[in-house]
Image: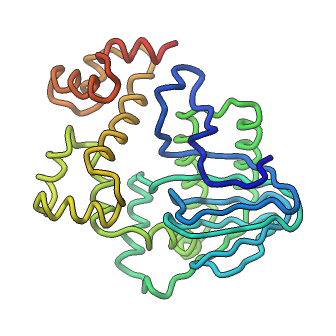
Amino acid sequence: MKNCYNFDPVKDFKSCLHSRGLYENVPVAFEYLKFETGNEVYTENLPKNYIIAFLSGEHEVTGGSIGKHLFRSGDLVCLPRHSKISGITRNSGEIITISFDIPLSHCDQRIIHNYLTSQPMHRMKITTIPIRQAMQYFFDMMRYLIIQEKACFHLHKIKLDEFFILLRGFYKKSEVISFLAPAILSMSEFSIYVYSHYHTASNLQDMIENSCYSRAVFYRKFKENFGTMTPQRWFNIQKRSQFLDVGSALEMTPKDMMHKLNLNSMSTMTRLCKELFGCSPNTLIKKLKY
């Protein structure tokens, strides 16, 4: 139980059962939180998009994009990155939060594309949807896994994909679009391009050259959309996540790792690995096994 929650899951995140120190940046995090009556939450700038499942209790949340709203057991809401929000628990209860950047599967990108091309964006407001039975089972499982400390870094990423599969499977398309509206509204064409293409680029320069932006325009738009973090720093964080995902697979070899990371040579991969982790790919793979 936290007296005042400040939306910083990385600080307390258990990460993986091995090499926990490597996971300094967590792109997806599920948290189970138990609030007593009178507990508070507050942030001037929500660091990621947040999906919040209210499992029990009553929680009053206030924010510029949501006004003042009383959430009760069974409510599900998506709050956009950069929101200024505060809240207080009126009746003690449990919450599960999912912090994430953006859904990146091809199906979820289609939802985003459909929304951006067909909806009057300025009319959309934050909308709650009910936690239906399939979702209730999902959050019950996540609650158990988190309490038992069995929810590692990789499982969190898989479970985010599962969440969006359930969202598409058990909710109407109009509900999905309305629910995701806050996260989608916070996106620009530029940020969609960055999130959709960074994983196939071997370096930042590749991503810039394959875009429709000059280097100067790319850097200016990046600052507008991602804040003070430099493009190179952001790109390195994403690549760290890719290296960790691929390197932790069973029977992984440096050569297999190079192919899975879509890199064109061992020298390129070795250079990147040393820049990101201070060691060779072979050493990183060994670290991830223990």
Residue 146: percent from the left, percent from the top? 71, 37
| Left or right: 215 as drawn, with respect to 167 | left
Q: Residue 278 appears at what percent x and percent y? A: 32, 21
Residue 248, above or below 196: above
Residue placed at 49% from the left, 88% from the top? Answer: 123
Residue at 82%, 64% in the rendered image: 89
What residue do we see at 70% from left, 43% from top?
142
Q: Position of residue 87 (x, y in %)?
A: 72, 67
Q: Is residue 147 above or below residue 191?
A: above
| Residue 18 x/y as whole percent | 55, 20
| Side (left or right) of 36 relative to 64 | right
Q: Position of 121 compared to 127: left or right?
A: left
Q: 154 or 43: which is nearer to us?
A: 43
Q: Name the residue at 48% across, 14% down.
A: 289
Name the image quarter holding residue 217.
bottom left
Q: How many marks?
A: 0
Q: Nearer the viewer, residue 29 or 215?
A: 215
Q: How is the image coloured?
A: rainbow
174, above or below 212, in the image: below
Nearer to us in this view, 270 or 110: 270
In the image, residue 281 sits, relative to residue 85, either above or below, namely above
